[in-house]
Image (spheres, rainbow, N blue to C red):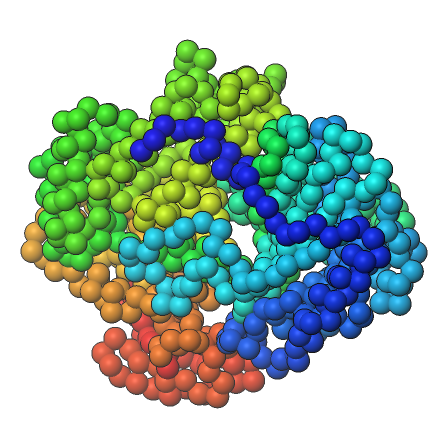
Amino acid sequence: MPAVTMRRVLPLIHATGFAATLALTATAQDALRQQTAVLPPLPAAHPDADWLLDPRPFTAGVHRGAHAAEIALDNGLLRRTFRLTPNGATVALDEVPTGRALLRAVKPEAIVELGGHRFAVGGLIGQPNHAYLLPEWRDALEADPAAMRLVDFTSGPANERLPWQRVRHCAPDAQWPPAGVHLAMRYAMPDSAPAPVRDITVTVHYELYDGVPVFSKWLEIHNATTAMITVDRFTSELLAAVEHGSNVETRAGAPTEPPAIHVETDYAFAAMTPRTANRFAVHWVPDPNYATQVNYQRQTPCLLEVRPEVGPSQDVAPGATFTTFRTFVLPYDGTDRERQGLALRRMYRVIAPWVTENPLMMHVRHADPDTVRAAIDQCAAVGFEMVILTFGSGFNIENEAPEYLAQMAELAGYAKDQGIELGGYSLLSSRRIGDGNDVVPPEGVTPTHGHCPALASPWGQRYFDTLYRFFGASGFSLLEHDGSYPGDLDTTARPPLQKGLDDSRWVQWRIITDFYRWCRGQGVYLNVPDYYYLSGSNKCGMGYRETNWSLPRDQQVLHTRQNIYDGTWQKTPSMGWMFVPLTEYHGGGAAATIEPLEEHLDHYERMLSSNLALGVQACYRGPRLFDSDATKRAVQRWVAWFREHRDILESDLIHGRRADGRDLDWMLHVNPALPTKGMLCVFNPLPRAVTKSLRVPLYYTGLTETARLRDANGRERTVALDRGFRATVPVTVPARGMAWYTVH
């Protein structure tokens, strides 16, 4: 692979054009109206259809609005309405089936700071009350003379924001690029703009997707001047949302909830949950214009601002274009936690479908060729799909010796011949490099992981060059990238890539996400213990405490199902890995260890069933998957069962009863698009068989009156659904065992 260059670090600054500029006169406004007139009218609503059961009726498009100067992005679930004159502005954001307004006031479409000059992009002023926005007020709103002015717009299908090479099993309905519509609205500088930035244009991009109430947004800033300009800062989204509640008082330690709108970006760091990972970009803040709010100090967090906390401070050459990160917005259509989780997981399936790749993976404990070949042979024998040369195995992805690369390529070829993928582990952050190659944080700040290499340093550039070359030459198809870049700031100038503090987070984010995007295009699977899904990562930790794998075996089983229950509120089963320490891990001795496997086969099977029955892949870490014919048969049996039911097992989970060791715990897979609409998996932690009846919610299977349940022996029974789409299901679960029932 070629060396890392400025083109790789800042690939979103590029030479481009858009559309021919229209004169900024009444003629331009007439042209906008003419563009609007040829758009299709707003579609009919589908008030009785539930998009979580059948997304097909909800097709995204750009439509002419109810007013001659308005257009709307609409998919039957979400409608964003724009006024085009006297300037471009969002004047409504509505939940279509109910007509519920999500927006209470007009704001600029964006804010950009260029070379020390700050400009609102579009927007309208003069709203008399910021608590709500009446349609009849829109005609009286005025353009801010100091704001950038709408020039034109174009539309088309949603774009492929990064390449995805499909090389392994994924969800049967996975589609890329996502079906949907793209709208681009271009703005030019006001007459009052100073000469150095007068020829800058900003294009605001929106996408709305079919079948899900999600839109994305980003900016392109084009430099048509003859001099370099600097994008100091930007705010790519401002939404004056309807507040979540009515808090009159503001008290320390008593936070006020923001609106029930999920917002995340691909500018996310150092966390395994979306809200924490997006803390550097997504900000719910008080709205200074909202004078009539009930909070006495006007501190209600009801204004969304999506912006980098620092920077980006990016230089844009004449003729080049700077592109921001992307924001994804999902307004929840209810307060039910289960429905909100299903909506979020559907969003990921649409905007990052590679997260549905879910290979069965063994973490081999030693990287010498004989052990690796033996692990490959065992995986092939039982139906596992991937071998990872795990942490502490001796694998060194930074070893560029030709003989080492040749050895790794030979092992990858050996694996491929048996239908097995081979990958390896690399640690980035959480280690100190020295010689000026480490992040130097601002005074008083400690790096997230204690130490962090500077990605723009000479070492950082060599490291990524090495990764590109290794995957280009070895035939490996997985990277477990531990200690991914956590968003640490760096005060050091590192020319030509980094000027210093203000651009350091942006530059380092671009370096690592460019690599992840490249991996996605090459079909390289990515295990990354951070929220890099939207930049191409496949899987993150489900969420567990590593030292819990040193607890006695019975406790590990319960923690496994607790962790999966808790993690799958926000993640699909395929998005989070779990852990099965076949050999001792962090201590615990014999009581915590499965090896010898045959001697603890009952526990091994409980761990296999606890993960596979919930659609989750674990890191099975050890030198082998089986040590006897009996162990081999058990693993084969569970893997074959998982593969037989894979599509429903990798579908979303409804949360039943959380494991606590006192009674049956259970969860329900649902997918109304499959022939098998659901699978109920029930676990018994007790030393005796348990028979009882469960009240199982079957609404999200799509069934309405009755359901047929089939048990492991093929016996069927028909159960009736009550008015809440719940069924009473009698179950019998053996001691320390599992029972499962398919739903049709």
How many labels were placed on the picture? 0
Quadrant location, the C terminus:
bottom left
Q: Residue furthest left?
A: 629
Of residues 447 and 663, the one drawn nearer to the viewer in this rendering: 447
How far across and how far down the image is residue 450, in percent? 47, 23
The residue depicted at 62 percent of the width and 44 percent of the height is 220
Q: Residue furthest top?
A: 435
x 31%, y 33%: residue: 1
Residue 701 shows in this picture? yes
Tell which of 327 and 661 is nearer to you: 327
**Rendering coords of residue 434 (x, y %):** 41, 14
Q: Residue at x 56, y 80 (%)?
A: 724
Give the quadrant of residue 643. Answer: bottom left
Left or right: where does residue 49 sit relative to residue 199?
left
User: In the image shown, does 669 or 413 lie closer to the viewer?
Assistant: 413
Quadrant of the image occupied by residue 355: bottom left
Which residue sits at x=32%, y=46%? 522
Q: Position of residue 441 (x, y in %)?
A: 56, 20
Frontmost residue, 489 versus 7: 7
Residue 84 quadrant: bottom right
> Where's residue 87, x and y in %?
80, 54
Q: Is residue 666 visible?
A: no
Q: Is residue 671 above or below residue 481?
A: below
Horizontal side of residue 694 vs 443, given as left or right: left
Left or right of 172 in this view: 637: left
